[in-house]
Amino acid sequence: MNKRIIAVFTAFALLYGACCLRLYTLSVSNPATASKPSGGYTVEIAKIRGDILDCNGERLVSHDYENVVVAKPTNKALAELEKVLDTQEYSDIEKRMSEGNAVSVNIGKLEINQNSDAVMLKKHIRYSEDQLARHIIGYLDGEGRGLSGIEKCFDDVLFTDKNLTATMKSDVYGRILSGNRIEIRNSNPDTASVMLTLDSSIQRAAENALDISSVVCGGAVVVEIETGAIRALASRPDFDTRNLAESLDDDNSPLINRTLGAYAVGSVFKVAVTAAALESGIDDFYYTCNGSCDVDGVVFSCNDKTAHGKLDMTKALECSCNTFFIELAKKTGAEKILETASLLGFGQEITLADGLTSKSGTVPTAEKLSSSGALANFSFGQGEFTATMLQLAEMVSAVAGEGTYVRPYIIEKVTSADGTILQSHEKTYPITALSEKNAASLTKMLVSVVENGNAQKAKLKNGVSAAGKTATAQTGMFKNGKEIYNTWFAGFFPADKPKYAVVILKEGGGSGAVDCAPVFKRIGDKLMDIEKFS
């Protein structure tokens, strides 16, 4: 019985103490917290955390702000607040001050004339309403520690125990003294920073292109071909960093970073099969398409069973003829296709940072491809084969890069609060995937796909040449009796002097030509405005 009474009393005491603490905090500081050390009041305005920067040194976080006024309970302070608060806010503040309480209040972008009893502090907002690159940057927990993305990977350098605070002196009775200046601490502290390869203008272009094109679920990546630097990683749907609970109940799973996931890719993989054939010395292959073909009793069809007639490699890529590539894969052989796929990076994960890795995807084994049906599926990117957006960027980068590509990366450097460089990207040697001659031949083919084939919606303005391939991939998943398709475009521009590889994915799409090629165009056209390509 005594134990029960003690337990109840303890619980009541803790509850009462918590309520008192909460009431005290609300009365002294809104929204900041306050403590009362000996001889004064301290108001905590904001926690201080290191910066995440883009490749140009621009802040990707904390670039927005709001002004916070810390005021003593005096008429002089109240007179300044009256100028920026509405009637109800002013009434509430006046009441709290009449009880002898100091206050802190957000006034947005408004400003006051500061004096000894009222000071204005700039409080940086970690995530803004139009926050870029939310999936790769990540978010924090309630204690200000990194919970996902770059925030989590580099939490040990970004986290600080510093706070932006304002301290007011008080007399022996705890009354705040007028006349003494309010002491501000950590208003402009040195902090660590993580610089990414992302370019804010390119990231914004990619995100806007997805949204304008109504890509509800999907993503876009932009990789600089010469260096492998990732300039944009945009995943959709987006989420509100300031209201994560809302995203947990969303059927479209907005917290998933689709730019790092593995998906069925379909006909985009025909680029790799063509590369393997060229590397095998097959450059004059012709095939007559009748709309379908029989492989060991299984019928494989082209889109709508269209009979494409006699085709060479260029025409087969332009119309994305499945039966052509089934026959080309037979002639090339599974072993050579697997070798080329491996050289292009398929089946290999990409580590962007400790704890941040792009999936490896799935590549069928040589044993499984001994089945003619499995090889037929593999020839146009179906079956068990899956890949990531970054792997497809590697593939088109190899074509654009005269047969070589650089592994994509996203961390440029990490700097400590005292300016010491803790980590810096080291240039890596390019990976050779095919010969310069065959890369040039394949580039011409992919330019023709955009100029004359089913990817004409990817044509860029001002006559700037582009190269690429569309895809409409079966997923084996169904909704309301209809199969869900992944649609794609993977390409590069300018085709004559390649700079950027761009890959777009849409989940639940209709066709890559309609869904994704226009996204490529929007990104390319915007980058031309930014960089003045000609």
Image (cartoon, grey):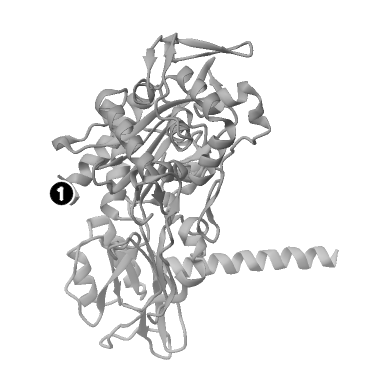
Residue labelled with disc 1: 532
Q: Position of residue 477 (x, y in %)?
A: 56, 24
Disc 1 residue crowd, few under 14, some 14–19, many 20+, Cα 10 Å:
few
The residue shown at (36%, 59%) is 197
Q: Position of residue 509 (x, y in %)?
A: 41, 25
Quadrant of the image for the C terminus? top left
Is 86 situated left or right of 475 in this image?
left
Would residue 196 be seen by someone viewing this image from the given angle? yes
Q: Position of residue 336 (x, y in %)?
A: 55, 36
Quadrant of the image for the N terminus? bottom right
The residue shown at (38%, 41%) is 396
- Residue nearest the observer in this picture, 343 or 277: 277
User: What count of labels does the image hold?
Assistant: 1
The residue shown at (51%, 29%) is 381
Q: Quadrant of residue 79?
A: bottom left
- Residue extending furthest toward the bottom: 172
| Amino acid carrying mark 1 in the image | Lys
The secondary structure type at the circle numbered 1 is loop
Q: Quadrant of residue 457?
A: top left
- Residue nearest the observer in this picture, 50 or 109: 50
Vertical placement of residue 200 versus 66, above or below: above
